Image: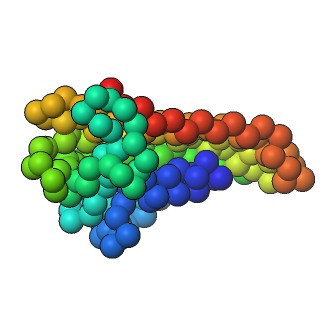
Amino acid sequence: MKSAACLCAIVLSCSLSPAGYAAAVSPILQGQSANGAERTISESLFDMTDSYYSFPCTADGELLPITDGELLLMEGQIYERWSTVLDGAGEYHTNINVMPIGLRGTSVETGEEFRVSEENRTIANQRLEGGSGMFRQVIKMVGKDTHRQFRLVAAGTYNISSDGIIITDRFVYREECR
């Protein structure tokens, strides 16, 4: 579940304004199969409207410090779905999927509209004897008029031994302008 925590930290620190966001959470759906496996699904809808994001690319495609980027006023929502299965052997398997809904940003300076897309894949397996997981998240912003692009890529994997020691911990964070 550490990948999920890291993913949440990335999403919150890179996508949300300090003013926060509103979230609507669905009731948790649960089901149980004949072999003792239990499935839990939790869905959330995060309203990004009136939050701000920095577009840190120049017109020439050079990366700027995040604090020097063009300020975008965001509009739209992010849908998030957590699906967790507790199998008959006592191991948890979690998938997290995220999908933007009408998500876009408008430059406060120029009025240019930016299309925002997000790809996300998170898988985590956890048991008392240890665990493993992976995540990959790509946030892409493209200017409608200038076609400038900004991509934020965060990915990682981990393995945890039965005594809680992280054996493998790979993390990639990359920002690109095109």
> 51 or 159, which is in the foreground?
51
The location of residue 150, given as percent across then percent down, is: 34, 36
Which residue is at 32% across, 29% downward?
61
**Drawn side of residue 109 relative to residue 87, left or right:** left
Residue 135 position, x and y percent, is 55, 39
Q: Identify the coloring.
A: rainbow
Q: Single out the residue that lies furthest toward the bottom.
A: 19
108, above or below 156, in the image: below
Q: Where is residue 172, by image quadrant?
A: top right
Please indicate, yes or no, whether residue 26 appears anywhere in the rendered image: no
Where residue 88 sits: x, y (%)?
A: 69, 47
Q: Residue shown at 21%/62% (left/top)?
A: 49
Locate residue 166 relative to residue 113 in the image: left or right: right
Task: Decide: is 74 above or below 94.
Answer: below
Horizontally, is 44 left or right of 37 in the view?
left
Residue at position x 42%, y 32% from top? 176
Nearer the observer, 62 or 50: 62
Q: How many marks?
A: 0
Q: Position of residue 142 (x, y in %)?
A: 23, 34
- Give the residue at x 19% y 47%: 104
Q: Is residue 154 above or below residue 42?
A: above
| Quarter of the C terminus within the rendering | top left
User: Which one is nearer the viewer's eye here, 114 or 63?
Assistant: 63
Q: In the rendered image, is residue 53 in sight?
A: yes
